Image (cartoon, coloured by chain):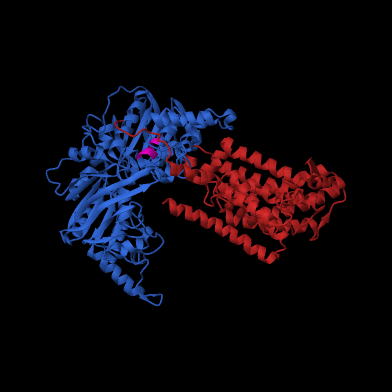
Chain colours: A red, B blue
Amino acid sequence: MTAQSPPIQGKTAGAHLRGVWEKTGMLVVLVVLLTCFTIFVPYFATWRNATGLSLSIATIGIISCTMLFCLASGDFDLSVGSVVAMSGVLSAVVTNSTNSVTLGIAAGVAAGGVVGLFNGFVIAYIGINALITTLASMQIARGLAFIFSHGIAVGVSNPDFFTLGISQTHLFGQLFIPTPVWVMIISFLVFATLLNRTTFGRNTLAVGGNAEAARLAGVAVVRTKIIIFTLQGLMAGFAGVIEASRFTSGQPNADLGLELDVISACVLGGVSLTGGIGTMMGVVVGVFIMGAVTNAMNLLNIDTFYQYIVRGGILITAVLIDKLKQWLAA
Amino acid sequence: MPDSSHLQFDSITKTFPGVKALSDVSFSVRSGSVHALLGENGAGKSTLLKILSGVYRPDAGKLLLGGEPHVFRSTAEAIRRGVAVIYQELHLVPEMTVAENLYLGHFPGRFGWVNRRKMRADALRQLEMLGENISPRARLSSLPIGQRQMVEIAKSLARDATVIAFDEPTSSLSARETDRLFAVIRQLRDQGRVVLYVSHRMEEIFQICDAATVLRDGRHVETFTNLSGVTRDTLVQRMVGRSITDIFGYRPRTSGEAVLEILGLTGKALSAPASCVLHRGEILGFFGLIGAGRSELMRLIYGADKPTGGSIMLDNRAQRPRKPSLSIRRGIVLCPEDRKKDGIIPVRSVAENINISGRRRFSPLRFIIAPRREKQNAQSFVQRLGIKTPSLNQPIKLLSGGNQQKVILARWLCEDPKVVLLDEPTRGIDVGAKSEIYNIIFSLAEKGVGVIVVSSELPEVMGVCDRIIVMRQGRISGVVERAGATQEKLLELALPISDPQPLTSVDTRKAS
C-alpha cells in the first residue's frame, strides 16, 4: 500500500446533484402534477376529493408494498388481482355462513397467504419462473373466486363486516381518513421499515441484485423468496377483504388487470424490473402519481377509453426518462 | 508517418462522474506489429478500448485511422471502419452455429433470405485461413473456449478488420490454446494488421508483443516502440510508478495443527475422491489447468455444491458441507472464481456488499439492521484494505476488479474465519492491487487462519504458497512442498495424461 488517493473522496457537485435527482426525481414530478391539477382542475384540491383520491388508491397502495419486494427480489406476481377477488368473495361467504366477521376476515387473508405460499414454493424451491407460475395461480385464484361465489356477487348481511371498509376517522375540518387509507399508510411505513431496517429487506435487494452471489454470501435465497411471495399473498388477501367490506359484497370479477396497475405504479416509482433496486418512497410517489392522474381525468370527465391511453403514456414516459438518465450518465 | 502508424490516439480525454478515466492520452501504433497496452486496473485501458470500439465517445481528442481522424458514434460505425475488439467475455451466441455467429448482423443472401450454403462455405474459408479445423455447422456451445475465441477472431476477419484489439484473451485458455492463439496473432501481424494486446501476464507481453504503451491513472506514461532490451521490471515499474522487486513478498511462518481435513469428498466434476489437510496459518496452493476440478473442489468444501460423498473435519469435528450459510457460520468462507457472476451484487453499494454476511453479528435478533454499526464496519474495512471508492454508497459494479475483490475479502474478514478459500484471487487484477491482496493473504495466515489459494498462474502459486497441491483431470495428482517446487515438477503433475488410466484406479467412488 503506497501512494494512493485517499480511499474516500468527497462527492463532486455533479454527482451530488444527480444523487438528489435519483432520490427525489419522481417526487418533483408528483409535486408539479399536484400543483397543476390544483390550479387547472376544478374541485381537485378539496378535502372531499382528497379523501376520495386516497380511497381510490388504497388497494393498489397496499399491494404495491409487497410488489416492491417481489420486484426488488427480481420476480413479480401476476396473481394479485385474482387473489383480491378470491379473498373478497371468500371472506363474504365465510362471514355469511359462520356469522363471524373475524373468521371471515381471517379466511380471506389466509387464502391469499396460501396462494402466495404456493407461488413462492413453486418459484423459489422448484425453480419455475415467476411469469408462468403466477400466470397459473392467477387463473386458479380467479376460478376459485367464481366457484366460491357461484359466479355472482356475494352480499354480506352482517353490518359489522363493513366497519373495515367504510369507517373513517375525523382528523380536523373536513378531513376524514377512511380506514382503508389508514391501512395503506401503515403498510407503507411497515414495509419501508422492513425493507430498510431489517436483514430480510436487505437480503431481498441482494437476491434481486445477484441471486447466486447472495447465496454464496450466506443469504437464504429460497427462504427469502418464499417469505416475499407469502407476504404478497397475505397483503393481496387483506386488500381483497377490505374491498369486499367497502362494497358490502365479494365480487368474483373484481379487479381484473389490477396486477398491471400495481406493477406500473412500482416501475413509475423507480423500482427496477431486473431486481436489486427499489425504494418505498418511490413506490408511494408512483402510486400517488397514477391515482392523481386518474382522479384528475375523472374530474375533467375524460372518457375512460382515453384514460387508458394516458396511463399507458405516463408509464412509458417514465421509463424513457429513466433510460435517458442512464444515457446521460454514460 | 502515413502508413507506418496506422492507428493513432490523439489527446484522448474521457471523464466519468467523479473520475478522470483518460486525460490527454496520445500515442501511435504501427501496422504490422503487436502493441501491448499495459497498466493497472483503473489505468484506463478498458476505457481506451471502449473508445476505440465506439462504446464511449471521448470528451476531447480523436482517433486517427491511417491518418484519417475519426470519432466513432457507435460500435456499428467502428466495425464498419475495420475496428474489432475481442473482449474477455466473448460476444457470441452460444445457441447458434459457428457460421451464423460469424455472419451475425450481415448474413449473406438477398431480401432477408439467408443463403446458408454460401454462409457455410465462407465461414469454412475464414476458419481455414486461421488454420482452424472447426465445422461451420457446429453449435457454438459445443466448442471449447479456445475455439470459440478463434470464431470471434474469424468474425472480425470476416468483417475485414484492420485493427484488432484483444482484451485479456488468454485468461481462460489452456497453455496449448494460448500457443494456438499466439500463432494466429503473429499471422494477423504479418498480414499488416494492427494488433492491440491487453494482458496482465507479463510473460505473454514479452512472448508476443513488439511494442508497448503504459498507462497509469488515465495518463500516458511511456511508449516503447521496441520491447527488446526492455525488462519486465522496467515495465512493472512504469505501471505502478515504483519498482516492485518481489510482488509476492512471501513471508515465512510456522504453521500449526490441522484446521481442515478433507476426507474423500466426491462430486460431479471430480473423477476421484479428494483428500488433503490444511493447517492453521498455512497457505496451501491448488494448481492445475482450467477444468482440473480445483474450483469444483472448493465449491464442494464450501457447500456451494452438495458433495455426493465424503466429509470434512474442521477443528477435529467431522462435518458435511451442506450449504454456504452453514459453512460461513462454521468458519469457512469462499471468494469465488468468477467475481462478477458469483461474488458481487453489482447494483448494490460497497457497504451492502461488505455487510451482507457479517451484519448478522451486530443485528439484534439477526433481523434488525444497525445502520451505524454497518457504516462503521464498512468504513473501517475500506480504510484497512485501501479500497478505492468515492463513497460507501457507490454501486460496487463501478469499482475496478481489484477493489471489488478487496470488498469481497472485507466481507469475509469481518466473519473472523478459520479457513479462507480463495479461487483465483488475483485474476484480472493489476500488479499493485495484486501485491496488496498477497499482503492480506499473508496477514491472514499469520493470524493462524488456514488459507487455500487456487491459481492457474505458476509464479503465483510458487510465490505465495507454503505447499502446493496439484490437480489433474478431476483428481489430486500430487503435493509439492514450497522448497521443492519447480515449474517443471508442477506442470508435469498438471498436464493431462494422454493414456487413459486403468479402470481400477478411476472407479474409486467406493473407496471412501
Q: Measuring from the top left, give residue A94's x and y in whole percent.
A: 81, 48
Q: Which residue is pictured at 68% across the width and 66% down the height?
A: A305
Confirm whether the magenta stretch covers residue B405.
yes
Q: What stretch is highlighted in magenta?
A: B402-406
Left or right of B79 on screen, residue A327: right
Residue furthest to the left: B229
The x and y percentages for residue B385 are 37, 31
* Percent position of residue A292, x then y: 67, 53
Image quadrant assignment for residue A251: bottom right
Q: In this view, does B379 lie above or below B68?
A: above
Can I make out residue B440 in this image? yes
Q: Magenta part mainly helix, strand or loop?
A: helix
In the picture, residue B296 is in which quadrant? top left
Residue closest to the eye, A240 or A192 = A192
Position of the N terminus of chain A, as image quadrant, is top left
Taking depth in this image into account, of A296 and B32 the one nearest to the observer is A296
Q: In which quarter of the image is residue B412?
A: top left
Q: In this view, does B359 lie above or below B213?
A: above
Residue B312 visible to an observer of this rendering: no
Q: Does the magenta stretch include residue B269?
A: no
Position of residue B247 in the picture relative to residue A322 (left or right): left
Q: Which residue lies furthest to the bottom in this view?
A: B111
